[in-house]
Image (cartoon, rainbow, N blue to C red):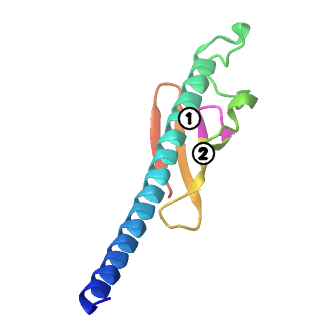
């Protein structure tokens, strides 16, 4: 082979290697974003369940304008996207969702916290 052909082969291998690295990086970033959005959707669903409990009278199985007695539904505490935990007080519920994908720092999983009150989702904090 001539030197020109060897040079073209080497350059082709380098370009293909760079393309593979870029594709893997984009796939990883997309997986993290998708998992974070799925966790936020799950938290929003749980927030509406908690608000519904708060709004229903106690004689209908609700909280009667309090969150006391509410807990995560067992079938929603763990999903394919991650796991959820709740801290319940009389006036609010703090729900934390931990995803199954690594977050932006590359060492801890995606984590989102949502605080729910009787009439609003007052804050959503994305920790990774």
Q: Where is residue 49 in the image (x, y as percent from the top left)?
A: 60, 23
Left or right: 61 as drawn, with respect to 32: right
**Residue shown at 56%/35% (left/top)?**
42
| Residue drawn at point x = 45 percent, y = 63 percent | 24
Which of marks 1 and 2 precedes in the sequence?
Answer: 1
User: Which residue, given by chain and number where applicable, does mark 1 sit on?
Assistant: 42
**Which residue lies at the image location 28% right of the left edge and 86% below the top edge?**
7
Is-magenta flag for residue 89? yes
Q: Do the residues labelled 2 and 1 touch (CB within 8 Å)?
A: yes
Say if 5 sits above or below 31 in the image. Answer: below
Q: Distance between the residues labelled 2 and 1?
A: 8 Å
Which residue is painted at 65% across and 27% down in the image? 67
Local SS, label 1: helix
Residue 53, above or below 35:
above
Within 10 Å of disc 1 (Cα), the crowding (few <14, some 14-19, many 20+) is many
Magenta residues (range): 86-94
Q: Which residue lies furthest to the top in this view?
A: 59
**Disc 2: which residue:** 97
């Amino acid at each position: 082979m001539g030197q020109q052909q060897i040079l073209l082969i080497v350059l082709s291998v380098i370009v293909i290697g760079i393309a593979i690295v870029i594709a893997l990086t984009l796939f990883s970033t997309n997986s993290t974003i998708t998992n974070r959005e799925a966790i936020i959707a799950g938290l929003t669903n749980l927030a509406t369940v908690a608000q519904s409990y708060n709004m229903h009278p106690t004689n209908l199985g609700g909280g009667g304008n309090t969150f006391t007695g509410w807990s995560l539904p067992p079938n929603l505490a763990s999903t394919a996207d991650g796991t959820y935990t709740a801290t319940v007080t009389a006036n609010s519920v703090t729900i934390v969702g931990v995803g199954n994908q690594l977050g932006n720092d590359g060492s801890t999983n995606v984590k989102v916290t949502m605080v729910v009150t009787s009439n609003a989702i007052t804050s959503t904090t994305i920790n990774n």
